[in-house]
Amino acid sequence: MYNLLISLFCSTAVMIAMTELAGQNPWVSGAVSVVVFAVAYFLLLRIVMKKFGVLMEEAQRDVQANRAERAIQVMKSAFKYAPWQLYIKQQINAQIGSIYYLKRDFNEALPYLEKAFVRHWVAMSMLAISYMKKSKPQKMADTFEKATSAAKNEPLVWALYAFCLAKSGEHTKAISILEKGLKKNPGSEELIKNLELLQAGNKMKMKVFGDMWYQFHLEKPGAIIKKQTKAMTGRRKMVVR
């Protein structure tokens, strides 16, 4: 990474200059070089991340305005900062993959999600679901393990993992995952309710997670439309009153 290399070059140059040219004690030169490295790295990091953040904010505004394609292009332009800082490339891939997935462009989303930041649990969950749909249960499980490891305190990721296992016929494993999730999230009503449903031999009810659940496209579009129509009908009734 350029930030690291430039900072290392600066600190090395200072140490050599102080030791060889100024005749300073090597220990003093070493201590000063460490400070120079830290300051240079901090300044470069701040500059790069500020520029990167501007592009991400612009892309976010495009997403909110339903300009998905423009948002993707803006994010792709941010790849130029990838050589400067660790994990920027993976973060961009996670964002682009998530947008394609939300648009139901699953084939376009997959290669980006596969290169996404492992600590981005939403992108990892989308990738795991994509593997499930492609009948790759082991890859699905491995990816969900990464997602739950990155977001232990997020009940939805545990529920998604269990839901996909149950959908794949792994009923016992699904119960085990919910029990594990509850140990990390004691008192989670959503996990408790779904665990009770599975233990009783019933299907999980994911609508308790609200809109976050629907972005993963695991429920048929018809059910989503029905939900939205019901909500709109409810609002009309309130207006009439």
Image (tube, rainbow, N blue to C red):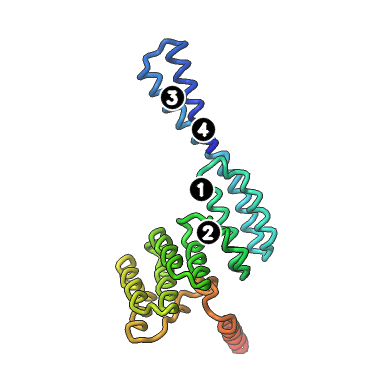
Circle 3: element type: helix
CB contact under 8 Å: marks 4 and 3:
no
The residue where tag 1 is placed is 87
Q: For label 3, count other residues whose C-alpha is less than 10 Å away and answer few (under 14), some (14-19) or many (20+).
A: many
> Measured along the vertical axis of the image, is residue 5 above or below residue 65?
above
Q: Amino acid at mark 3?
A: Ser
Separation of marks 3 and 1 at Cα, in angstroms: 26 Å
Q: For label 2, count other residues whose C-alpha is less than 10 Å away and answer few (under 14), some (14-19) or many (20+).
A: some
CB contact under 8 Å: marks 2 and 3:
no
| Mark seen at residue 114 | 2
- Identify the residue at image location x=46%, y=56%: 118
| Mark seen at residue 176 | none
Quarter of the figure with residue 166: bottom left
Q: Which label sits in the foreground, 2 or 3? A: 2
Circle 4: element type: helix
Separation of marks 4 and 2 at Cα, in angstroms: 28 Å
Q: Amino acid at mark 4?
A: Leu
Q: Earlier in the sequence, mark 2 or mark 3?
A: 3
- Identify the residue at image location x=45%, y=65%: 139
- Identify the residue at image location x=35%, y=74%: 173
> Measured along the vertical axis of the image, is residue 31 above or below residue 220?
above
Circle 2: element type: helix
Is 4 displayed left or right of 61 in the figure?
left
Q: Amino acid at mark 2?
A: Glu
